[in-house]
Each structure stands twice: as C-alpha cells, then as structure tokens.
Amino acid sequence: MNALRPVPRTLLRDRAYEAIRDAIVAGEIEPGAVVRDADLAERLGLSRAPVRQAFARLVDEGLLESKPQSHTRVTPLVAADVRDAAAVVGAMHELVTRAAVPRLRTADTDAMRAANER
C-alpha cells in the first residue's frame, strides 16, 4: 500500500493559469495575439470561469493585457524592455557568481564538470 499517497488538490483556475502561462512563455501563443476565454476553455477542456480567473492573474502579472469590452491579448514584447530585463538578469547572475564562487568546494566543481560532460 505504499503506492497510495494523498492526491494533491489543485484548482482548475490554477491548472488553466499554468497551461496558458506555459503556452505564452514557450511562444505557442505569440506576443500580441488576441486570446478568447471561450477558445482557450474549449482547447483546455474547461469551462470559461477558470480560464477567466487565469486571465485575471495573467493580467496582474503582465503577461496579458485586457481592454474591457474590446480584447484580451498577450502583452507585446518591447525591445527596450527586453534589453532592460536582460541587464537586470545579467547583474543578478554576476552578484550570485561573486557570492557563490568563494564557497565552491572541489566536489561542487567536479559535479558541475560531470553535468557539463553529460
């Protein structure tokens, strides 16, 4: 009976959010594309309510933009914003590297080399 474990409870709105977010991030739904709750609900095999809730969360996070009574679309990419984000990510990587390198042990370096070879 070790195979029986509690089943995690997940809400449909969370599953819809994850599926839509992943599709946007992967580029399956392109920047600027208009999205309709009814279309995505049908594709996901859900009712419109959890998709609408997912849309609200994605709007809050900036992945979607919504104009009431008009449209909801994937937020278009702006080259300047991408450059700015890349600069921030680069600075964060530099900071992490400066903090981590002095703490590296030989075993850590060996593990990274083995991972690179794989």
Image (cartoon, rainbow, N blue to C red):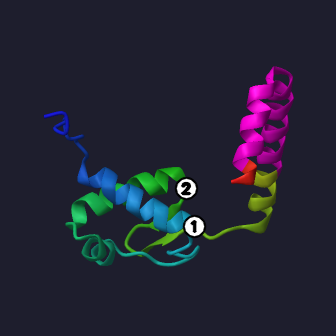
Q: Which mark is residue 86?
A: none
In the image, the segment drawn in magenta is 87-115
Residue drawn where x is 82% and y is 25% of the image: 99
Up the image or down, 35 lies above or below 92; here it is below
**x and y percentages locating residue 92 in the rendered image:** 78, 38
Quote the CA–CA distance across marks 1 and 2. Answer: 7 Å
Residue 89 highlighted magenta (yes or no): yes
Q: What is the secondary structure assignment of the residue under circle 1?
A: loop
- Main SS, magenta region, reads helix
The tag on residue 75 is: 1
Amino acid on which the number 2 mark rests in the picture: Gly
Between residues 47 and 107, which one lies in front from this camera angle? 107
Q: Position of residue 93 (x, y in %)?
A: 79, 40
Seen at 42% across and 64% down, the residue is: 20
> Given the image, on which type of amino acid does mark 1 rest?
Thr
Q: Is residue 118 above or below residue 25?
A: above
Residue linked to disc 2: 62
Residue located at (31% from left, 78% from top): 39
The answer to which of 49 and 95 lies nearer the viewer is 95
Q: Position of residue 28 (x, y in %)?
A: 51, 75
Residue 25: quarter of image: bottom right
